[in-house]
Image: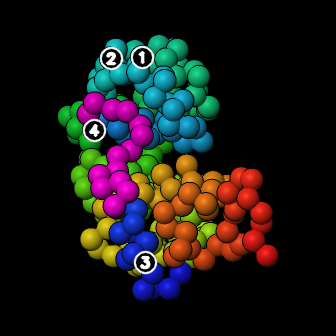
């Protein structure tokens, strides 16, 4: 993607969705952290289904600790890898209570020291909770970055670094949400829905997918 195409690309995404939000449901920053931790290799919808029952009962680190491992697993057993995630979340809650008074740390280094919290999870928390212009590269953003030519890279970190360099500052805070939603609902893995994409004119992907029922362009 040409540098001159990047600003109109994001301007179109902004016009369609001026204030994008994460689709994970949460009531406080701890719940955000917990939801993102639980969402690894799982869908937001699946996580929300579990946390709608969990968070009213255990919506703070201490409350999760009070549930114990068996209790926590009972609430999240519908989520993939729930046993590992339950252990990580309990260990994270213990650190939050003992070292941070139940609050969420505000630096990447501290967040990444929490069990089950990697770079992507830290980036989401820093962006959504604290408004930092981070790029949390999941499978959707990795695909969109490469397919559109916006931020090509062979690894998630390479795509993240390319986005940090190429996304204009005025779009940086919301950029990863726009790209996630684009990848989730339009620029899908098997068959991108180019015919309804608001940014297809700036995208490098060829040939564009025609609308169902239309003839394939020659």
Expressed as whole percent of the image width and height from the top left, the position of residue 143 reads 61, 62
Q: Which residue is mark 4?
A: 29
Element marked by disc 3: helix
Q: Which residue is mark 3?
A: 6
Eye-nearest disc, 4 or 3: 3
The label on residue 53 is 1
Note whether residue 103 is visible: yes
Element marked by disc 2: helix
Eye-nearest disc, 1 or 4: 1
Note whether residue 107 is visible: no
Which quarter of the picture shows residue 102? top left
Q: CA distance from mark 4 to mark 2?
A: 14 Å
Q: Assess whether residue 28 is covered by the magenta stretch.
A: yes
Query: Residues in magenta?
Result: 15-29
Expressed as whole percent of the image width and height from the top left, the position of residue 31 reads 33, 32
Q: Residues within 10 Å of mark 1 (few under 14, many from 20)?
A: few
Q: Residues within 10 Å of mark 4 (few under 14, many from 20)?
A: some
- How has the structure been colored for display? rainbow
Eye-nearest disc, 3 or 1: 3
Do callouts 1 and 2 mark residues in contact (Cβ within 8 Å)? yes
70 shown above or below 136 = above
Between 103 and 184, the residue placed more toward the observer is: 184
Do callouts 1 and 4 mark residues in contact (Cβ within 8 Å)? no
Instruction: Answer with mark 1 or mark 4, whichever residue precedes in sequence.
Output: 4
Q: Residues within 10 Å of mark 3 (few under 14, many from 20)?
A: some
Q: Which residue is mark 2?
A: 56
Give the residue at the far front of this rendering: 214
Q: CA distance from mark 3 to mark 2?
A: 42 Å
């Amino acid at each position: 993607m040409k540098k001159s195409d990047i600003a109109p690309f994001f301007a179109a995404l902004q016009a369609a969705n001026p204030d994008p939000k994460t689709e994970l449901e949460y009531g406080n920053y701890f719940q955000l952290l917990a939801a993102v931790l639980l969402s690894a290799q799982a869908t937001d919808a699946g996580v929300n289904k579990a946390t709608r029952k969990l968070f009213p009962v255990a919506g703070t680190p201490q409350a999760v600790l009070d549930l114990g491992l068996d209790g926590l697993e009972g609430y999240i057993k519908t989520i993939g890898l729930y046993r590992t995630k339950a252990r990580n979340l309990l260990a994270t809650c213990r650190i939050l209570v003992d070292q941070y008074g139940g609050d969420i740390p505000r630096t990447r280094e501290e967040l990444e020291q929490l069990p089950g919290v990697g770079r992507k999870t830290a980036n989401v928390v820093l962006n959504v909770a604290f408004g930092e212009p981070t790029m949390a590269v999941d499978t959707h953003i990795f695909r969109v970055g490469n397919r559109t030519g916006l931020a090509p890279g062979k690894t998630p970190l390479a795509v993240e670094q390319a986005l940090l360099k190429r996304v204009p500052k005025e779009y940086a805070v919301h950029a990863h949400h726009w790209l996630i939603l684009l990848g989730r609902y339009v620029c899908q893995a098997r068959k991108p829905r180019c015919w309804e994409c608001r940014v297809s004119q700036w995208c490098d992907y060829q040939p564009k997918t025609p609308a169902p029922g239309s003839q394939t362009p020659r």
